[in-house]
């Protein structure tokens, strides 16, 4: 049996396993009683290389319970485990049957946690590649290193993986900045950052504005930006404005595509692992003047994806 690469996500009680049966290589079947609140039946083989199939069948209904192979060869030698979902306990007892083994000692556990198993080799792209979307939560504050250095501002806040995709970015101001017109932005070299780039100006993000509960919504169960747009917002606004500029009345000017010269600010692809920087200056440009803030905390959120 060839090894597979898996990601095992356990939900619920972390230390909720109970040993139901301990068997030897001479035994290929065992019947166990499921304790209350069992979510997953775990069958573990000390040497499972010869095992070709494991089934878990209800004693009363004779129905098979769904299972997943977890071959942990790369982590713990030749040990192999099978997970069976028994959250819907139709039977009080189940029979576990092993085919092609077991080749050594094996055990059956009841687990009060739910396991979700993903086969990484079978993911899109093959070779272990996965399409992974992550939201990075990155903290910064008024006195982070070089965040407001006059003429050369920039606090290195995130090191990207070359080839990854930036889907969106936004800033939450938790404690408002004081000082002289504190404006923030993110980027690398050059005066203007990503938030100001489409407009060829500084300003960027107003760091005196904190998050607010969206007005008029029942319950006020969410926080949103107060004059703190996301990169996707800015990109959409710029292209909408560009489109309006070339519209004559209700018709597009002949021969003109409103987005022909548009800017796809996001998503974009990182082409190197050069650290992304964040800064706060008086005009929002990285070469601007220190606003002289003595307070201010914020969080930068980056939504990234790893393509297959």
Image (spheres, helix red, strand yellow):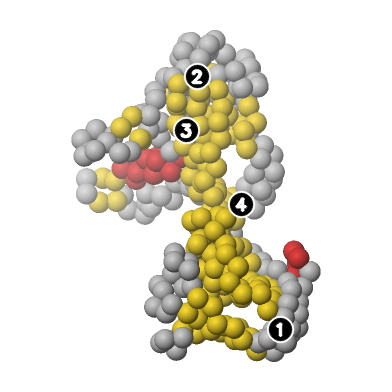
Mark 4 or 1 closer to N-term? Answer: 1
The residue tagged 4 is: 164
Query: Looking at the rendering, which quadrant does residue 50 occupy?
Result: bottom right
Judge by depth and name the residue closer to the eye, 14 or 92.
Answer: 92
Residue at horizontal 46 percent and vertical 37 percent from the top: 170
Residue at the location (24% across, 38% down)? 219
Tag shown at residue 102 = 1
Give the label on residue 171, or none. Answer: 3
* Percent x, y of residue 28: 66, 87
Location of residue 119 with respect to 189 vertically, above or below: below
Q: CA distance from mark 3 to mark 1?
A: 55 Å
Please identify, in this view, whether the residue under mark 3 or under mark 1 is nearer the observer. 1
| CA distance for labels 2 and 4 | 30 Å
Q: Secondary structure at mark 2?
A: loop
Q: Secondary structure at mark 1?
A: loop
Residue 189 is marked as: none
Q: Secondary structure at mark 4?
A: loop
Residue 296 marker: 2
Task: Identify the mark nearer the N-term, 4 or 3.
Answer: 4
> Which residue is more in the foreground, 146 or 49?
49
In this view, the mark in front (1 or 2)? 1
- Residue 248: percent from left, percent from top: 26, 45
Which numbered disc, 3 or 1, marks the residue that appears first in the sequence? 1
Q: CA distance from mark 4 to mark 1?
A: 43 Å
Q: Quadrant of residue 26?
A: bottom right
Disc on the earlier residue, 3 or 2: 3
**Tag in front: 4 or 1:** 1
């Amino acid at each position: 049996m060839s090894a597979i690469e898996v990601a095992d996500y356990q939900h619920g009680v972390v230390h909720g396993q109970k040993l139901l049966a301990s068997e030897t290589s001479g035994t290929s079947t065992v019947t166990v009683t499921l304790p209350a609140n069992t979510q997953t039946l775990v069958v573990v083989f000390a040497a499972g290389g010869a095992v070709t199939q494991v089934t878990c069948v209800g004693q009363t209904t004779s129905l098979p319970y769904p299972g997943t192979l977890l071959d942990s060869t790369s982590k713990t030698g030749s040990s192999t485990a099978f997970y069976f979902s028994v959250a819907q306990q139709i039977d009080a007892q189940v029979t576990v049957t092993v085919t092609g083994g077991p080749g050594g000692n094996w055990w059956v556990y009841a687990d009060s946690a739910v396991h979700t198993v993903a086969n990484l080799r079978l993911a899109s792209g093959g070779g272990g590649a996965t399409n992974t979307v992550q939201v990075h939560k990155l903290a910064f504050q008024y006195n982070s290193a070089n965040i407001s250095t006059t003429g050369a501002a920039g606090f290195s806040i995130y090191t990207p993986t070359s080839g990854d995709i930036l889907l969106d970015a936004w800033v939450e101001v938790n404690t408002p900045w004081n000082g002289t017109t504190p404006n923030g932005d993110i980027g690398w070299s050059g005066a203007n950052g990503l938030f100001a780039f489409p407009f060829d100006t500084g300003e960027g993000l107003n760091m005196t504005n904190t998050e607010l509960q969206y007005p008029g919504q029942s319950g006020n169960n969410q926080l949103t930006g107060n004059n703190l747009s996301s990169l996707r917002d800015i990109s959409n606004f710029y292209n909408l404005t560009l489109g309006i500029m070339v519209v004559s009345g209700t018709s597009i000017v002949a021969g003109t595509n409103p987005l022909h010269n548009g800017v796809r600010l996001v998503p974009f692809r990182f082409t190197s692992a050069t650290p992304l920087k964040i800064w706060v200056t008086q005009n929002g440009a990285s070469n601007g003047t220190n606003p002289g803030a003595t307070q201010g905390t914020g969080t930068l959120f980056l939504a990234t994806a790893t393509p297959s």
